[in-house]
Amino acid sequence: MNALCTVHYVLFVTFYIDDKFLLDYNVYMRNITELIDILSERHILSYEEYLEIISNASESQKDYLFSRAEEIRKKIYGTDIYIRGLIEFTNYCKNDCFYCGIRASNKKCERYRLTKEDIISCCSAGYDTGYRTFVLQGGEDPFFSSDDMADLISSIKKQFPDCALTLSFGEYTYDTYKKWKDAGADRYLLRHETADKTHYNKLHPKKMSFDNRIRCLKDLKSLGYQVGCGFMVGSPFQTCEHLAAEMIFLNKFQPDMVGIGPFIVQKDTPFGNMKSGTLEQTLIMLALIRLTLPDVLLPATTALATIDPFGRELGIKAGANVCMPNLSPVSVRKKYALYDNKKSADEEAAEYTQQLSERMRKIGYNIVTDRGDRKHANIEQ
Ligand code: SAM
């Protein structure tokens, strides 16, 4: 066991957030099991305490972490798994994120766009299978004007009034986000990618800005969207310290949803020779997120299912409560290639919802036909 765990020492910690000293207090560095218990009860740890768990948890302590996360997830969401039908409607993107297979400079990416009719027929097929949330995801594709998107949003909401609509296509102005909210959008997913500005600049070209990403997240929140942020686990240059800082960021931002998954190499990007993130570290982060934000909507992502055949199940057992099978037309699925070998068949595909349901039942969970909104648990910190 690491020396830090055994030596109980007193550390003076100051939380410095947004130009304010929020709290100063003495923290006893306890052993990791104790830290997990405290997190389960108080839903917050210090940066050093998160770092200790992320860096030094033993196998049995990780199992304990997962079991505490599953316990709290069951307390709030029971054994329900919310499903979202993911429609990847365009893989054109004006951005050039160094990690992403649909980046503008990737000439090997075979581009496609769905029409409004295509998208609505995906929703129809999903509705008939029991989906009550549709997620429209895409690259930042200027082909679709903000008015085109508003028209699409209001058409979907008119045709499927009992469904929630989640948008996920990047950074826009306050006014554009407002237009889409007024058109009926309910949720917006915009991963911040990393809470560390210097790290952000290593993952993105100069044209892209951490400050703008955060501005977008704040605008979305102020407009009343249910907001999701998130990051890749094991992205190039990421350290355990960055991951501990993620937890402080999430605690401060208090999102409704958090999308995390392992970074997976895409061979035609500048990071094509880097190492992918791991299943284990992703599971640790899922469990820490569940314990920190007990009622958050937390998907077991496609990236997790891609790096391990049981990634989805293991994600659920570590605290996740959402799955997002693919509702896009089969002909385009392989083209939305964010990373190599991205899973788009079998239980990642909406046609296999019955099989997904069976797999969930085997681990004691059940897929529900529900919008799957966040349940606001009364959490005191
Ligand atoms: N354009 C929208 C945006 O910027 O939020 C949504 C599409 S973007 C491709 C969706 C997410 O895919 C990103 O936020 C990123 O975290 C994830 N992603 C991209 N490349 C990845 C990779 N190589 N491995 C894992 N996840 C990746």
Image (cartoon, rainbow, N blue to C red):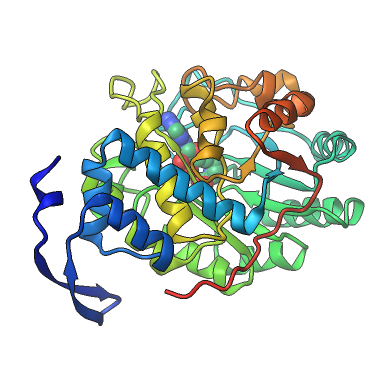
Residue 334, picture quadrant: top right
On screen, 380 above or below 133?
below
Relative side of 177 to 87, left or right: left
Residue 215, picture quadrant: bottom left
Q: Position of residue 88 (x, y in %)?
A: 66, 35
* Residue name at image x 74 percent, y 68 percent: 182
Relative side of 128 to 281, left or right: right
Q: Position of residue 158 (x, y in %)?
A: 89, 56
Q: Position of residue 32 (x, y in %)?
A: 25, 50
Residue 336 visible in this rendered orientation of the protein:
yes
Residue 222, picture quadrant: bottom right
On screen, 50 above or below 315?
below
On screen, 260 above or below 173?
above
Relative side of 215 to 332, left or right: left
On screen, 308 above or below 206?
above
Quarter the C terminus occupies: bottom left
Q: Position of residue 350 (x, y in %)?
A: 75, 29
Residue 171 visible in this rendered orientation of the protein:
no
Quarter the N terminus occupies: top left
* Residue name at image x 78 percent, y 36 percent: 115
* Residue name at image x 79 percent, y 27 percent: 354
* Residue name at image x 18 percent, y 70 percent: 27
Front in this rendered view, residue 340 or 243: 243
